[in-house]
Amino acid sequence: MTELIQSQLMDPFRIGLIVALVYTMFRTRAATGTAIPLALGVVFVAVILPTTNPPRAGTVTDAVLAGLVSNLIILGIVLALAMIVRRLRG
C-alpha cells in the first residue's frame, strides 16, 4: 500500500488534475463555495484514474483508497502554495 501511495504522489497527471481543481475552485468560489467542490474533485480523481488505467498490483479498491490519501496530501500542498502565492500578490 505504501508503494502505491508513493507512486501516486509522483504521478504528474494526478498532480495536474489537483492543481486544475484548486485553480477552478478559486475562480468559481463565489458561486460554488470551496469544501464541496474540493471534496468531490478529490473523490473524482481518486476513482477515475484507477478505473481507466487499472493498477498492475493490487485491486482497484486499494488503488482508489490509496488515491484518496495521496490526493489529500497533494491537495494540502497545492492549497498551501496557492495561499502563499495569493498573499505575496497582495
Image (tube, rainbow, N blue to C red):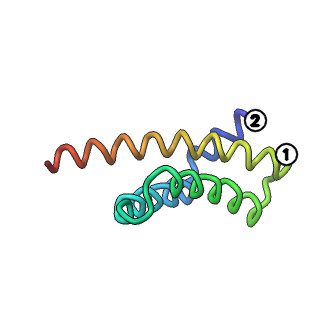
Image-quadrant location for residue 19:
bottom left
Q: How many marks?
A: 2
Q: Which residue is mark 2?
A: 1
Quadrant placement of the N terminus: top right
Three-letter residue code for mark 2: Met
**Nearer to us in this view, 70 or 83:** 83
- Nearer-N-terminus badge (2/1): 2
Residue 58: image tag: 1
Q: Amino acid at mark 1?
A: Gly
The residue that appears at 49% across and 59% down in the rendered structure is 16
Dot 1: what SS?
loop
| Residue 55 x %, y % | 78, 54
Locate residue 88, reporting x and y percent. 17, 44
**Residue at the extreme top of the image, as rendered:** 2
Q: Is residue 4 left or right of residue 86?
A: right
Crowd around label 2: few <14 · some 14–19 · many ≥20 (10 Å): few
Whether the residues at callouts 2 and 1 have beta carbons within 8 Å, the answer is yes
Q: Nearer the viewer, residue 76 or 9?
A: 76
